[in-house]
């Protein structure tokens, strides 16, 4: 079982990739997209979005990162892919799935699923522009308004020379609304001769099991599910191995990672966005952990880094001092930071 970490603009950037891969259970990451328009980007743009390029294209935990490009012009994408290849990414991924209106309005992302011939041209041009040993992969949705051309688009990607295909099992029109149509991934798998990765609506181990059965895929890409439950990758892998321990990653393991996340945010990101990033992750975590719900309520109205520092220190101290039975009461006893 291979677990990939999804690219998610505005959420799964290098900071959260770093922390989630420290938790473990993730075999490979794909960066959020680097937008290509009509110019050859300088190397600093690539390394700003994918700073792992400066450390062997791996996170601190050693997990490889592929850099994703988004655009609609085959020539410009190929030129930029060539420059990016010189920085040594673990591979280059192409975005044919972004549902954002601003991206689609400019001809990129999921809109390209209306024109499989352009998809073919893009993949073929990028494949020619990078060394043969460097993987070129792509991510697509099932379609734009409907899934009638899903197999045609997948064949265009494979025919253009891609080494791997990730399929988000929804159309652009379906956005992120459940369900995901995993059985359509099986149709794509039957049509192409390259590895296919299933993506979409995998929140739990049971979701992963049903996705595998419906899609036939042994490779899964996790997005919001692993942001909500950082141990989901481990749990899925353990569920496939009867001899493996079934222990889940709990709040006592997540809280120190939250503190590490805050440290990286404070050292690497602009001051105006720091508190918001912590709240953003807590907002996801509270779907899985009651303690995260309490934490979110305690800091949701503050943006003062000093108060957040003190609050996190108190949280960690409470966890260190109290045993499992008393931890919840100890955390609840911490006063709100803006009191």
Image (cartoon, grey):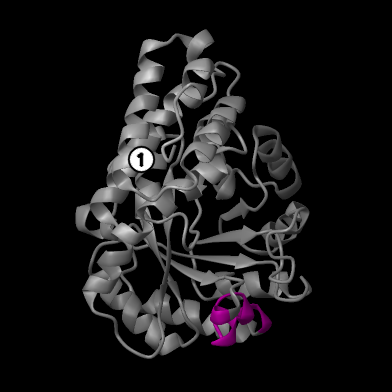
Is residue 106 magenta-colored? Answer: yes
Please say whether residue 59 is visible from this viewpoint: no
Residue position for label 1: 308
Q: Which residues are magenta?
A: 102-114
> Which residue is depicted at the point 45% across and 8% down?
323
- Looking at the rendered image, the quarter that the N terminus falls into is top right
> Which residue is depicted at the point 56% across and 55% down?
195
Q: Position of residue 289 (x, y in %)?
A: 58, 31
The reply, left or right, for residue 214 in relation to residue 29 is right
Is 143 placed above or below 227 here?
A: below
Between 177 and 24, which is closer to the camera in this rendering?
177
Secondary structure, magenta segment, majority class: helix
The reply, left or right, for residue 319 in relation to residue 291 is left
Is residue 152 magenta-colored? Answer: no
* Callout 1: SS: helix
Q: Position of residue 139 (x, y in %)?
A: 55, 65
The reply, left or right, for residue 81 in relation to residue 122 is left
The reply, left or right, for residue 169 in relation to residue 325 is right
Please say whether residue 334 is visible from this viewpoint: yes
Tell me where residue 205 sits by quadrant: top right
> Which residue is depicted at the point 43% across and 42% down?
27
Is 302 placed above or below 96 here?
A: above
Is 307 placed above or below 147 here?
A: above
């Amino acid at each position: 079982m291979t677990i990939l970490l999804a690219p998610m603009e505005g959420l799964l950037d290098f900071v959260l990739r770093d922390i989630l891969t420290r938790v473990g259970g993730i075999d490979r990451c794909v960066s959020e997209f680097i937008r290509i328009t009509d110019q050859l980007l300088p190397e600093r743009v690539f390394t700003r979005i994918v700073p792992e390029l400066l450390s062997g294209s791996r996170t601190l935990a050693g997990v490889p990162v592929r850099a994703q490009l988004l655009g609609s012009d085959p020539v410009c994408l190929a030129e930029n892919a060539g420059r990016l290849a010189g920085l040594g990414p673990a591979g280059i991924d192409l975005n044919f799935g972004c549902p954002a209106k601003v991206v689609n309005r400019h001809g990129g992302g999921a809109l390209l699923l209306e024109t499989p011939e352009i998809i073919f041209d893009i993949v073929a041009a990028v494949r020619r522009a990078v060394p043969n040993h460097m993987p070129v992969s792509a991510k697509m949705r099932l379609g734009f308004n409907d899934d009638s051309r899903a197999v045609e688009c997948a064949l265009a990607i494979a025919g253009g020379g891609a080494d791997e295909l990730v399929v988000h099992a929804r159309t652009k029109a379906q956005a992120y609304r459940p369900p995901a149509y995993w059985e359509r991934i099986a149709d794509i798998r039957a049509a192409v001769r390259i590895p296919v990765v299933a993506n979409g609506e995998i929140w739990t181990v049971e979701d992963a099991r049903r996705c595998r059965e419906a899609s036939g895929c042994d490779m899964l890409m996790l997005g919001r599910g692993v942001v909500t439950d950082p141990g989901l990758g481990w749990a899925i892998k353990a569920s496939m191995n009867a001899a493996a321990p079934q222990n889940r990653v709990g709040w006592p393991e997540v809280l120190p990672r939250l503190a590490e996340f805050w440290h990286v945010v404070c050292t690497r990101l602009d001051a105006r966005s720091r508190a918001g990033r912590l709240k953003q992750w807590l907002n996801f975590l509270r779907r899985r952990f009651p303690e995260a719900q309490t934490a979110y309520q305690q800091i949701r109205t503050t943006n003062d880094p000093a108060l957040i520092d003190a609050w996190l220190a108190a949280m960690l101290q409470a966890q260190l001092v109290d045993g499992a039975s008393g931890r919840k009461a100890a955390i609840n006893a911490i006063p709100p930071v803006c009191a």
